[in-house]
Image: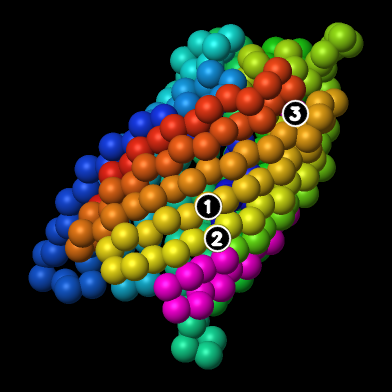
Amino acid sequence: MASAGVRFGCLFAALTLATEARAGDEDFSAGATLRAETTGRGDRDLLVLGALRRAGTTLSLGYGQAAGRDAPERHALLASLSQEIVEVREEPLEVEIETRLAPDQAGVARREIQASARWSGLGTGFQFRTTDASAARLVAMGFSLEASRTFGGFSTGVGASVFDLNLRAPRAANPWGRFSRRTLDWAERWSVCASLGAREGPLAAELSASLGSPPAAPITQQVELKVEAKFLRAVLAAKAGFLALPAGPAPSLGAEVRLEP
Protein backbone atom coordinates (compact mmCIF):
# COMPACT_ATOMS: atom_id res chain seq x y z
CA MET A 1 0.00 0.00 0.00
CA ALA A 2 1.27 3.48 -0.87
CA SER A 3 0.70 4.83 2.65
CA ALA A 4 -2.93 5.54 1.90
CA GLY A 5 -1.91 7.47 -1.16
CA VAL A 6 0.51 7.48 -4.06
CA ARG A 7 3.51 9.62 -3.17
CA PHE A 8 5.02 11.36 -6.20
CA GLY A 9 8.65 11.35 -5.12
CA CYS A 10 11.80 9.59 -6.15
CA LEU A 11 14.23 7.63 -4.03
CA PHE A 12 17.62 9.38 -4.32
CA ALA A 13 19.67 7.12 -2.07
CA ALA A 14 18.82 4.49 0.51
CA LEU A 15 21.19 2.67 2.83
CA THR A 16 19.74 0.08 5.20
CA LEU A 17 21.73 -1.40 8.06
CA ALA A 18 20.08 -4.18 10.05
CA THR A 19 21.01 -6.78 12.60
CA GLU A 20 19.10 -9.90 13.56
CA ALA A 21 19.07 -10.85 17.24
CA ARG A 22 17.80 -13.94 19.00
CA ALA A 23 17.81 -14.16 22.79
CA GLY A 24 16.52 -17.60 23.62
CA ASP A 25 13.43 -17.06 21.47
CA GLU A 26 13.49 -18.35 17.91
CA ASP A 27 10.61 -16.04 16.96
CA PHE A 28 12.35 -12.80 17.96
CA SER A 29 14.26 -10.62 15.49
CA ALA A 30 15.37 -7.00 15.27
CA GLY A 31 16.41 -4.70 12.47
CA ALA A 32 17.22 -1.09 11.61
CA THR A 33 16.70 0.94 8.44
CA LEU A 34 18.34 4.08 7.10
CA ARG A 35 16.75 5.54 3.97
CA ALA A 36 17.13 8.80 2.04
CA GLU A 37 14.81 10.19 -0.67
CA THR A 38 14.53 13.12 -3.05
CA THR A 39 11.67 14.22 -5.29
CA GLY A 40 11.42 15.88 -8.67
CA ARG A 41 10.57 19.10 -6.82
CA GLY A 42 13.90 19.06 -4.97
CA ASP A 43 12.55 17.69 -1.67
CA ARG A 44 14.86 15.56 0.45
CA ASP A 45 13.83 13.04 3.12
CA LEU A 46 15.80 10.91 5.55
CA LEU A 47 14.38 8.03 7.59
CA VAL A 48 16.04 6.05 10.38
CA LEU A 49 13.87 3.18 11.58
CA GLY A 50 14.32 0.32 14.02
CA ALA A 51 12.00 -2.70 14.14
CA LEU A 52 11.36 -5.53 16.61
CA ARG A 53 9.39 -8.58 15.50
CA ARG A 54 8.12 -11.49 17.55
CA ALA A 55 5.68 -14.04 16.16
CA GLY A 56 3.05 -11.96 14.31
CA THR A 57 3.78 -8.62 16.00
CA THR A 58 6.13 -5.93 14.64
CA LEU A 59 6.94 -2.71 16.48
CA SER A 60 8.85 0.05 14.65
CA LEU A 61 10.25 3.32 16.00
CA GLY A 62 12.10 5.91 13.96
CA TYR A 63 13.26 9.40 13.17
CA GLY A 64 12.54 11.39 10.02
CA GLN A 65 14.15 14.45 8.50
CA ALA A 66 12.81 16.51 5.60
CA ALA A 67 13.98 19.55 3.67
CA GLY A 68 13.08 21.22 0.40
CA ARG A 69 14.15 23.81 -2.11
CA ASP A 70 12.08 26.47 -0.32
CA ALA A 71 11.73 24.79 3.08
CA PRO A 72 14.21 24.53 5.97
CA GLU A 73 15.21 21.19 7.50
CA ARG A 74 12.59 19.65 9.79
CA HIS A 75 12.52 16.62 12.08
CA ALA A 76 9.83 14.08 12.98
CA LEU A 77 9.24 11.05 15.19
CA LEU A 78 7.66 7.90 13.72
CA ALA A 79 6.09 4.79 15.23
CA SER A 80 4.09 1.85 13.92
CA LEU A 81 2.57 -1.35 15.27
CA SER A 82 1.64 -4.27 13.01
CA GLN A 83 -0.25 -7.34 14.21
CA GLU A 84 -1.37 -10.53 12.49
CA ILE A 85 -4.70 -11.11 14.22
CA VAL A 86 -6.13 -14.22 12.55
CA GLU A 87 -5.71 -16.58 9.61
CA VAL A 88 -8.45 -16.69 6.99
CA ARG A 89 -8.16 -19.55 4.50
CA GLU A 90 -4.56 -20.08 5.60
CA GLU A 91 -3.69 -16.41 4.86
CA PRO A 92 -2.93 -14.02 7.77
CA LEU A 93 -5.08 -10.95 8.27
CA GLU A 94 -2.73 -8.13 9.33
CA VAL A 95 -3.65 -4.74 10.78
CA GLU A 96 -1.21 -1.84 11.19
CA ILE A 97 -1.28 1.59 12.84
CA GLU A 98 1.33 4.21 11.93
CA THR A 99 1.92 7.67 13.38
CA ARG A 100 4.19 10.57 12.40
CA LEU A 101 4.70 13.64 14.56
CA ALA A 102 6.68 16.69 13.44
CA PRO A 103 6.53 19.37 16.17
CA ASP A 104 6.51 23.07 15.33
CA GLN A 105 9.72 23.97 13.47
CA ALA A 106 10.19 27.18 11.51
CA GLY A 107 6.46 27.81 11.92
CA VAL A 108 5.41 24.43 10.48
CA ALA A 109 3.99 21.41 12.35
CA ARG A 110 2.49 18.14 11.09
CA ARG A 111 0.61 15.25 12.69
CA GLU A 112 -0.39 12.09 10.82
CA ILE A 113 -2.00 8.76 11.64
CA GLN A 114 -2.69 5.83 9.31
CA ALA A 115 -4.54 2.58 9.84
CA SER A 116 -4.49 -0.28 7.34
CA ALA A 117 -5.49 -3.91 6.93
CA ARG A 118 -4.09 -6.53 4.52
CA TRP A 119 -5.13 -10.02 3.55
CA SER A 120 -4.08 -12.23 0.65
CA GLY A 121 -3.03 -9.46 -1.73
CA LEU A 122 -5.90 -7.15 -0.74
CA GLY A 123 -5.44 -4.01 1.32
CA THR A 124 -7.39 -1.01 2.57
CA GLY A 125 -6.29 2.00 4.57
CA PHE A 126 -7.36 5.22 6.25
CA GLN A 127 -5.22 8.33 6.72
CA PHE A 128 -5.75 11.54 8.69
CA ARG A 129 -3.25 14.39 8.90
CA THR A 130 -3.06 18.04 9.84
CA THR A 131 -0.35 20.41 8.62
CA ASP A 132 -0.04 23.87 10.19
CA ALA A 133 1.96 26.79 8.80
CA SER A 134 1.28 30.00 10.73
CA ALA A 135 -2.02 31.35 9.38
CA ALA A 136 -2.52 28.37 7.03
CA ARG A 137 -3.76 24.91 7.95
CA LEU A 138 -4.49 21.77 5.92
CA VAL A 139 -6.76 19.01 7.21
CA ALA A 140 -6.65 15.91 4.98
CA MET A 141 -8.60 12.68 5.39
CA GLY A 142 -8.64 9.82 2.89
CA PHE A 143 -9.06 6.15 2.09
CA SER A 144 -7.13 3.77 -0.14
CA LEU A 145 -7.60 0.36 -1.72
CA GLU A 146 -5.08 -1.98 -3.32
CA ALA A 147 -5.01 -5.45 -4.84
CA SER A 148 -2.15 -7.63 -6.06
CA ARG A 149 -1.86 -11.08 -7.58
CA THR A 150 1.04 -13.44 -8.23
CA PHE A 151 1.18 -15.85 -11.19
CA GLY A 152 4.24 -18.05 -10.89
CA GLY A 153 7.19 -15.68 -11.26
CA PHE A 154 5.01 -12.69 -12.25
CA SER A 155 2.98 -10.26 -10.18
CA THR A 156 0.50 -7.46 -10.88
CA GLY A 157 -0.96 -4.79 -8.65
CA VAL A 158 -3.39 -1.87 -8.73
CA GLY A 159 -4.24 0.77 -6.15
CA ALA A 160 -6.28 3.94 -5.68
CA SER A 161 -6.84 6.59 -3.04
CA VAL A 162 -9.21 9.51 -2.54
CA PHE A 163 -8.82 12.43 -0.12
CA ASP A 164 -11.00 15.18 1.30
CA LEU A 165 -8.78 18.28 1.54
CA ASN A 166 -9.58 21.41 3.53
CA LEU A 167 -7.01 24.21 3.24
CA ARG A 168 -7.53 27.31 5.35
CA ALA A 169 -5.08 29.91 4.09
CA PRO A 170 -4.96 33.65 3.41
CA ARG A 171 -6.04 34.73 -0.04
CA ALA A 172 -3.25 34.44 -2.61
CA ALA A 173 -2.81 33.90 -6.33
CA ASN A 174 -1.56 30.34 -5.71
CA PRO A 175 -2.35 29.35 -2.10
CA TRP A 176 -1.83 25.60 -2.69
CA GLY A 177 1.58 26.02 -4.30
CA ARG A 178 2.81 28.41 -1.63
CA PHE A 179 1.55 26.14 1.17
CA SER A 180 3.05 22.96 -0.32
CA ARG A 181 6.47 24.49 -0.98
CA ARG A 182 6.69 25.73 2.59
CA THR A 183 5.33 22.62 4.34
CA LEU A 184 6.39 19.87 1.85
CA ASP A 185 2.82 18.55 2.06
CA TRP A 186 2.00 17.89 -1.61
CA ALA A 187 -1.65 16.98 -1.22
CA GLU A 188 -3.68 15.05 -3.82
CA ARG A 189 -7.43 14.74 -4.19
CA TRP A 190 -7.11 11.29 -5.77
CA SER A 191 -4.47 8.96 -7.15
CA VAL A 192 -4.31 5.64 -9.02
CA CYS A 193 -1.37 3.32 -9.68
CA ALA A 194 -0.57 0.02 -11.39
CA SER A 195 2.48 -2.25 -11.39
CA LEU A 196 3.84 -5.30 -13.18
CA GLY A 197 6.66 -7.36 -11.71
CA ALA A 198 8.73 -10.46 -12.39
CA ARG A 199 10.98 -12.58 -10.17
CA GLU A 200 13.56 -15.21 -11.05
CA GLY A 201 15.38 -16.68 -8.07
CA PRO A 202 16.97 -13.86 -6.05
CA LEU A 203 16.40 -11.27 -8.81
CA ALA A 204 13.25 -9.21 -9.32
CA ALA A 205 12.07 -6.25 -11.41
CA GLU A 206 8.95 -4.09 -11.22
CA LEU A 207 7.55 -1.44 -13.56
CA SER A 208 5.01 0.95 -12.02
CA ALA A 209 2.98 3.93 -13.23
CA SER A 210 0.79 6.33 -11.29
CA LEU A 211 -1.49 9.33 -11.80
CA GLY A 212 -2.47 11.94 -9.23
CA SER A 213 -4.68 15.01 -9.07
CA PRO A 214 -3.22 17.81 -6.93
CA PRO A 215 -5.51 20.75 -6.13
CA ALA A 216 -5.49 23.63 -8.62
CA ALA A 217 -2.90 21.88 -10.84
CA PRO A 218 -2.85 19.49 -13.84
CA ILE A 219 -2.72 15.75 -13.34
CA THR A 220 0.76 14.51 -12.50
CA GLN A 221 2.29 11.26 -13.73
CA GLN A 222 5.13 9.06 -12.57
CA VAL A 223 6.78 6.02 -14.17
CA GLU A 224 9.47 3.95 -12.42
CA LEU A 225 11.46 0.79 -13.02
CA LYS A 226 12.82 -0.95 -9.94
CA VAL A 227 15.22 -3.90 -9.82
CA GLU A 228 16.37 -5.79 -6.75
CA ALA A 229 18.47 -8.73 -5.65
CA LYS A 230 17.96 -10.69 -2.44
CA PHE A 231 20.67 -12.52 -0.50
CA LEU A 232 19.24 -14.35 2.51
CA ARG A 233 17.56 -11.48 4.42
CA ALA A 234 19.46 -8.71 2.63
CA VAL A 235 17.80 -6.90 -0.29
CA LEU A 236 19.70 -4.60 -2.68
CA ALA A 237 17.53 -2.45 -4.93
CA ALA A 238 17.78 0.42 -7.41
CA LYS A 239 15.17 2.31 -9.41
CA ALA A 240 14.96 4.97 -12.09
CA GLY A 241 12.12 6.83 -13.73
CA PHE A 242 10.61 10.25 -14.25
CA LEU A 243 8.04 12.50 -12.63
CA ALA A 244 5.93 14.65 -14.95
CA LEU A 245 5.27 18.07 -13.40
CA PRO A 246 3.60 21.21 -14.83
CA ALA A 247 7.10 22.66 -15.29
CA GLY A 248 8.18 19.59 -17.27
CA PRO A 249 9.51 16.06 -16.60
CA ALA A 250 11.96 15.50 -13.74
CA PRO A 251 14.18 12.39 -13.60
CA SER A 252 14.13 10.08 -10.58
CA LEU A 253 16.87 7.80 -9.34
CA GLY A 254 17.17 5.67 -6.26
CA ALA A 255 18.94 2.91 -4.40
CA GLU A 256 18.15 0.82 -1.34
CA VAL A 257 19.79 -1.72 0.92
CA ARG A 258 17.55 -3.58 3.36
CA LEU A 259 17.82 -6.46 5.81
CA GLU A 260 14.32 -7.63 6.69
CA PRO A 261 13.65 -8.64 10.33
Residue assigned mark 1: 207
- Residue 60, given in percent of the width and then of the height, sits at 37, 50
Q: Are marks 1 and 2 in contact (CB under 8 Å)?
A: yes
Question: Local crowd at mark 2 within 10 Å, few (<14), some, or many (≥20)?
Answer: some
- Residue that badge 2 annotates: 196
- Of circles 3 and 1, the one toward us is 1
- Residue at 31%, 60% in the rendered image: 203
Q: Quadrant of the N terminus?
A: bottom right
**Sequence order check, earlier mark of 1 and 2:** 2
Q: Residue at x 78, y 21 (%)?
A: 176
Of mark 2 and mark 3, the one earlier in the sequence is: 3
Q: Secondary structure at mark 3?
A: strand
First to last magenta residue range: 138-156
Separation (CA) of disc 1 from disc 2: 5 Å
Q: Which element type, helix, strand or loop, lies under badge 1?
A: strand
Which amino acid lies under the numbered mark 1 shown in the image of this protein?
Leu
Q: Is residue 1 left or right of residue 65?
A: right
Q: Are marks 2 and 3 in contact (CB under 8 Å)?
A: no
- Residue 178 falls inside the magenta stretch: no
Give the residue pinned by disc 3: 138
Name the residue rendered at 51%, 74% in the picture. 150
Q: CA distance from mark 2 to mark 3?
A: 34 Å
- For marks 3 and 1, the one nearer the N-term is 3
Residue 258 visible from this viewpoint: no
Percent x, y of residue 84? 45, 73
What's the mark number on residue 77?
Answer: none
Q: Quadrant of the C terminus?
A: bottom left
Is there any visible trace of residue 124 in the rendered image? yes
**Residue at x-position 20% and y-position 63%:** 232
